Amino acid sequence: MFETMLQVMGLHKSEIVLLPINEVYNEDPVTITANINDDGTIAEANLRYRTTINGTTSGWNLVTDQNGPTANLYEFIIPGEPDNTIVEYYISAQDNDDNVSTLPQGGSGTNPPGSIPPPTFLDYEVKIPGTPIILDITPDGDTTIAPNGHVGFLVSAQDTSGFNLTYKWWKNSSQLSVVGNSYLYFSNPGLPYPRVDTIRVQITNGFFYNGNTWLVSVEDASGVNNEISDLTYSLSQNYPNPFNPVTTINFSIPEQEIVNISIYNLLGEKVTELVNKTMPAGEYKINFNAEDLPSGIYLAKISAGSYNQIIKMSLLK
């Protein structure tokens, strides 16, 4: 259970000290513990809460300490709520002289105490973290380079629960001082080859992790055809073509660029965008799924720096 401590001090003076909750990261019940003191005795104490889900706010629900207080400590258990729920609550207490105090201050009413809410409330939000999702990786598999070559690694990820993502990179067993979602690997020609280096990225939202691992084979240049220095701007014809409904598009860029690949119909209307991001130099392939489109001719256009190219693709269903 998620627990917090609230202190209600000097009931007849309404002196209140609180330690608020801001966020709850699971659907477990939340225990609110209140230390309620008075110069006399506490006749009754309770907590009221309400929830707001998708803009709809419930009525107030009454919670009491089912086990009774221990000394002056009261435990109020708010049931667990689903993700993206805002919970508002306040605590009420009545002493043997019928004085009523609330936390926050300003509420009143007896039988039970606090039937008239204060003007403001305590609140917390239920934010349940999920596992980060990898949308795209570059390269999309293991790769081979020359002893003096280099290759760029790029990860596109998102967190569906809205938490910020951080990235950690490793080369073999050593963590790299790389910040962000990209890493440019340079082979050291002074090291023996052929050899295989392992590049690993870990993505976290602070709660859960995802990641990817690549194997980089470093081989003699005579056996390598994909050195970065040999790359040019290109957009190859898709394959298969005609296709139904998925086809593959190959392209390459010789240096890091902002790349956009969009699909248009013959009226010049954009029907989808496949790529729109900064990418390191390399050779790439992406899939185009036209399941929701009618048969016909479509145009794939790449824009990378000053380079622009268009190919025609035939969708036959």
Image: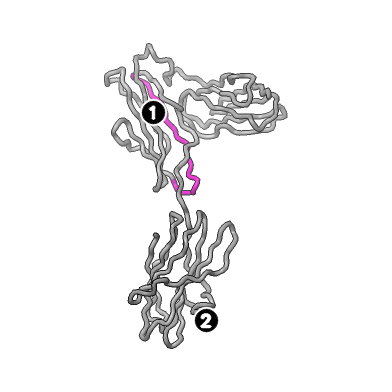
Image quadrant where one finds the C terminus: top right
Q: Nearer the viewer, mark 2 or mark 1?
A: 2
Residue at 37% across, 68% down: 5
Residue 74 vertical placement versus 238 (above, below): below
Magenta segment, which residues?
A: 147-164
Q: CA distance from mark 2 to mark 1?
A: 66 Å
79 relative position to 240: left or right: left
Question: Does 162 lie within the magenta span?
Answer: yes
Secondary structure at numbered mark 1: strand
Label ID, residue 109? 2
Q: Residue at x 47, y 40 (%)?
A: 133
The image quadrant where one finds the N terminus is bottom left
Q: Amino acid at mark 1?
A: Trp
Instruction: State yes or no: residue 242 in magenta.
Output: no
Q: Earlier in the sequence, mark 2 or mark 1?
A: 2
Res 16 → quadrant: bottom left
